[in-house]
Image (cartoon, grey):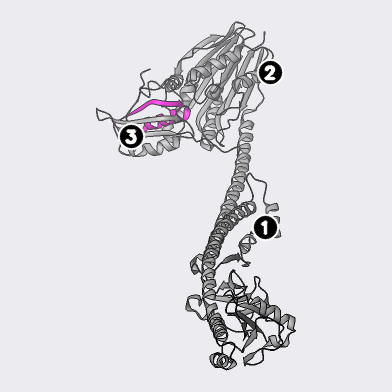
Amino acid sequence: MSVRVAVNSVDGASGESVGDSAPTPSPSAASAAARTPRIRGHSPQFNIVAVAVIGVLINAGLSFGAYSLHDSNENRLLEQRVREGAAVASANIPSVQTPIASAAVLAESTDGDPEAFRRFLSPIVGSGQLFATVSLWPASGVVRRPLAVVGTQPELATESSAAIRAVLERASGQGTLAINNLLTARERRLGYAYRASKRAHLVVYAEAPFPKNRRARIAQNEAFADFDYAQYLGRSIDSRFLLASSKGGVPLRGRQASATVYFGDQTLLVVMAPRTQLGGTLLARLWWLLGLVGLALTLGAATLVGGLTRRRQEAEVLATENARLYAEQRSVAQTLQHSLLAEAFPEIPGLEFGARYIAGVEGIDIGGDWYDVVRLDHGHILIVVGDVSGRGLEAATMMAALRYSARAYAVEGYSPATILTKLSGLASVARDGHFATVLCGLLDVGTGRVTFANAGHPAPLLITATGAEFLETSIGVPVGVGRGSSYSEVEFACPRGSTLLLYTDGAVERRGERLDVGLQRLKDASSAVDGPLESYLDTIVSRVLPEGADDDTALLGVRWRG
Amino acid sequence: MAGIDEGPTKAIVEAGFDDAGIALVSIKGELDLASVPGVELELEPVMAASPDRLAFDLSKVTFMDSSGIAMLLRAAERVPTIEVREPSPSVQLIIRATGLADVLQVDL
């Protein structure tokens, strides 16, 4: 027996349901994206779609993999079963051939005795029997009628003598049935011609009916209960030549496999289609189970990503809004501070004043730096630079209090050291949480001398034609550290054309750097420039604070005109 | 995000006692406007114990500005005797510049 197996899958469900379900942004989602302010990163819609697309692709891949596995598994199992089915069909052939062959041998040995022929065959011929008719024919010569007939008149007898001859001659006497295809006739039949041997003179010819919906024996076989089944005469699926089917002549659908076996001098095509999943239902369902679970996970992930992205954007919007509010607040504070500081300097012959205030970028609160120039009697000028520690309203309030108190004490005629002592009685780090460094200088316009008292403040710079140098003031404790602290005064001479530079620590302090480095930088920046006081201060600021100040910074310059 | 402080300055505080049983607070990092409020929160339990004497080890302080000075001064107001041990060069410079060596009992 030779078996040829062909498998063709017509199962149309492969994975298409998965790929179609990628969510696409709806028009309303797109307009929502347009309303969102432009922010870094992708929109929630984009992220949702991206995650969904990636998820669906992965799903599709997994599902396709599971489906392919299932598919190839089913095909392999089906191929195996259709071979078995073909073998069963092949094993059924002798049940047709044996009685015909036996009748042929009998006829040959009785020299065609019609009586013996009838006796032998009558039990298996007739309505409901294996054959509708069996007849005896001469193996050669021109024949028109059978020598003997059991049952009804064979269809063959209605044909031309050439056609009869052609059928009978195919019975070659080599142990093979010659199949006469009468399936397209009005009464569907198959004819079988058999000759006992090559030298035999007689041919036995039988015809069996094939009603369209005849159930095949193989279909009743329990081993194949799970299959739909069809047998065709020939090598192709042609409903005209359907011999048997479990579906009553309806073509098989879905996954199917076929195998051919020899049937007399023709072939039989055995086609089988499983009614259930051969590899088990779990494997069969795995691909769409994976798809469903994956889709659910993807939907969840996309929703989560969308939510997170939206929340991040909301947070960013909030942060941007906060930053704007802070900046606004800060600028209000700066305006306030500048209004406190930017008073016109007194017009003193022979003296020039200039100041800069640079707001630090750190924090948003107003700083406590200040400078002041107060014209006093008898050709004296008080210059003050101070710095209240910390920031905020408290620091600014303390700054204002110290600034106006210093003015008042100066107008009263107190010396710089006494002014500082009096200021120290006003503030307390224990009470206010802040302290202040204050540098207080009294200028004698006539003599060009300046008397400094210092409450913990960075030393002033005196810039002359020979360069810049820090004035060695006597440094006392900052204001607010001890009540009634005493301070010492040191007097310096400022030559004509020289410049005094007072500043707060923002000009010299820099993170990750020692204080003396910053002091040296300021000294270098101050000594290497010339020109009018205003541009001189600008140059110093640009050299000392090229990237802006960390902390608030105040500069006060006093120049003796040459 | 202009206008909002980005790199928060960090200071690590360890509180304990030295061999002589004096309360000792070691600070590592930067003492500035940004870090001082946090440091003071961690100092609070030490302060709450009302020690007679409190020592600060500032050898690992890399940067200190007037906020750090203010913190030390506030501590000095609550503890009878305060001292600063092994101040790093940065700390030494700012303490010297503000004339606080005596108040903070720093040997410069």
Mark closer to the chain start, 2 or 1: 1
Name the amino acid, label 2: Ser
Name the amino acid, label 3: Ala
User: Is residue B26 or residue A555 the one in the foreground?
Assistant: B26
Circle 1 — which element? loop
Give the letter of the chain under mark 2.
A
Q: What residue did someone put label 3 on?
A: B15
Is A71 situated above or below B107?
A: below
Asked whether the beta carbons under mark 2 and mark 3 sit within 8 Å of each other, the answer is: no
Give the letter of the chain under mark 3.
B
| Percent of width and height locating residue A80 | 51, 66
Q: Going 56% across and 25% down the picture, which residue do you hit?
A: A407
Circle 2 or circle 1, nearest the eye? 1
Q: What residue did someone put label 1 on?
A: A25
Is A492 situated above or below A70?
A: above
Q: Note whether residue A292 is visible.
A: no
Circle 3 — which element? strand
- Which image quadrant is residue A214 in? bottom right
**Mark 1 to mark 3 CA distance (whole Å):** 58 Å
- Magenta highlight range: B52-78
Do the residues marked 2 and 3 share a common chain? no
